[in-house]
């Protein structure tokens, strides 16, 4: 009896019982839209700050589309590369590739096409610097983080985190056609936010990472050391978040917001370091997502 939803065939290919909407939904899932939404917040915020609160509407629209395509393409290729470990880790076994709903070859082609579409769209409708930066972000995420570092060093997320810090550069370049010191300060904020954010997640999923022998910090150095690193990097992150004020590029609204948001982050990280259970760690991870979004929104409000 057919159910109207897709099932995996014995050869791993998508079964022909899939509905069109279900088929399209799986390709959307390949792009990881929930993750991309935060990247787009940092992209748009950078455009507002760079343009003194008034970015062009069309430039903003096409930059958001191009940014989504680049990040979505990187995520799709990531799921092609990581399909072996995704099939073992509990939280990833329902991803479209490992479940057999999308073939690995199709996922790879889809990711490459999205990356190419992003470059062409941004290049012709925004500017070629923004297009080049979007491609660099994709290549760093796929080539440097996923293929090279993820399975070889516990420092993978520190170096590979540069990929997630590229969107503010794309936004700044889209608004101005160039990169300034302030653009690189926004890059630095996301770069230094990545370790405490991702290591909190790694603590929650340490058993999964250990089962597939991915050398995330909790697997290699233990939970206690990782919790300490989350706390230390949280202090560093808050310090870096104040650099736009020190450079004269942000004012009192942002300064007060950065201090308040950072104080909550550090307090949660301190609780995660002090307590052996994962309660504070989960709170730290969830708050880290809100923290980055609100921090960049504060930059926009300050610019306005």
Image (cartoon, helix red, strand yellow):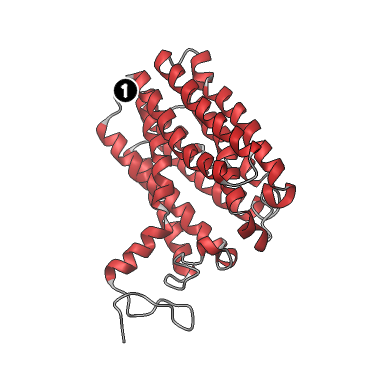
Figure disc tally = 1
In what quadrant of the picture does the C terminus appear?
top left
The quadrant where residue 62 appears: top left
Q: In this view, does 286 lie to the left or right of 88?
A: left
Residue at the (66%, 63%) spot, across then down: 211
Disc 1 crowd rating (10 Å Cα; few below 14, some 14-19, many 20+) is: some
Front one among 263 and 168: 263
Q: Is residue 256 left or right of residue 188?
A: left
Q: Where is residue 1 in the image (x, y as percent from the top left)?
A: 31, 87
Q: Is residue 22 left or right of residue 295?
A: left
Front one among 178 and 73: 73
Q: Where is residue 63 in the image (x, y as percent from the top left)?
A: 35, 39
Q: Where is residue 273 in the image (x, y as percent from the top left)?
A: 64, 37
Of all residues, the one furthest to the right in this rendering is: 221
Q: In this view, does 249 lie to the left or right of 281?
A: left
- Tell me the residue that label 1 is attached to: 53
Of all residues, the one furthest to the left in this rendering is: 57
Residue at the (43%, 41%) spot, across then down: 39
Q: Where is residue 170 in the image (x, y as percent from the top left)?
A: 43, 35
- Against 235, residue 140 (above or below) is below
The quadrant where residue 209 appears: bottom right
Front one among 185 and 227: 227
For mark 1, give the secondary structure: loop
Front one among 231 and 164: 231
The answer, for residue 170, to whether it is visible in the render is: no
Residue at the (68%, 49%) spot, across then down: 218
């Amino acid at each position: 009896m057919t159910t109207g939803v897709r099932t995996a065939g014995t050869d791993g290919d998508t079964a022909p019982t899939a509905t069109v909407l279900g088929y399209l939904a799986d390709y959307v899932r390949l792009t990881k839209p929930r993750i991309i939404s935060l990247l787009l917040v940092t992209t748009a915020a950078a455009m507002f700050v760079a343009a003194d609160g008034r970015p062009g509407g069309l430039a903003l629209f096409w930059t958001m589309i191009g940014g989504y395509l680049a990040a979505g393409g990187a995520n799709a290729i990531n799921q092609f590369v990581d399909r072996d470990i995704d099939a073992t880790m509990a939280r990833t076994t329902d991803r479209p590739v490992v479940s057999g709903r999308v073939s690995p070859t199709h996922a790879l082609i889809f990711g490459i096409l999205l990356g190419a579409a992003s470059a062409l769209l941004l290049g012709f409708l925004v500017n070629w610097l923004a297009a080049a930066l979007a491609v660099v972000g994709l290549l760093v995420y796929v080539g440097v983080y996923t293929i090279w570092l993820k399975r070889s060093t516990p420092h993978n997320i520190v170096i590979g985190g540069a990929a997630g810090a590229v969107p503010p550069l794309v936004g700044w370049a889209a608004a101005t056609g160039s990169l300034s010191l302030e653009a690189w300060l926004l890059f630095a904020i996301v770069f230094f936010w990545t370790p405490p954010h991702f290591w909190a997640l790694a603590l929650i999923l340490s058993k999964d990472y250990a089962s597939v022998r991915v050398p995330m910090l909790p697997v290699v150095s233990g939970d206690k050391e990782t919790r300490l690193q989350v706390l230390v990097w949280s202090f560093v992150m808050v310090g870096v978040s104040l650099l736009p004020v020190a450079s004269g590029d942000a004012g009192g609204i942002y300064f007060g917001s950065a201090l308040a948001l950072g104080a909550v982050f550090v307090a949660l990280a301190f609780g995660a370091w002090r307590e052996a259970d994962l309660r504070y760690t989960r709170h730290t991870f969830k708050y880290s997502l809100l923290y980055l979004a609100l921090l960049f929104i504060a930059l926009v409000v300050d610019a306005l």
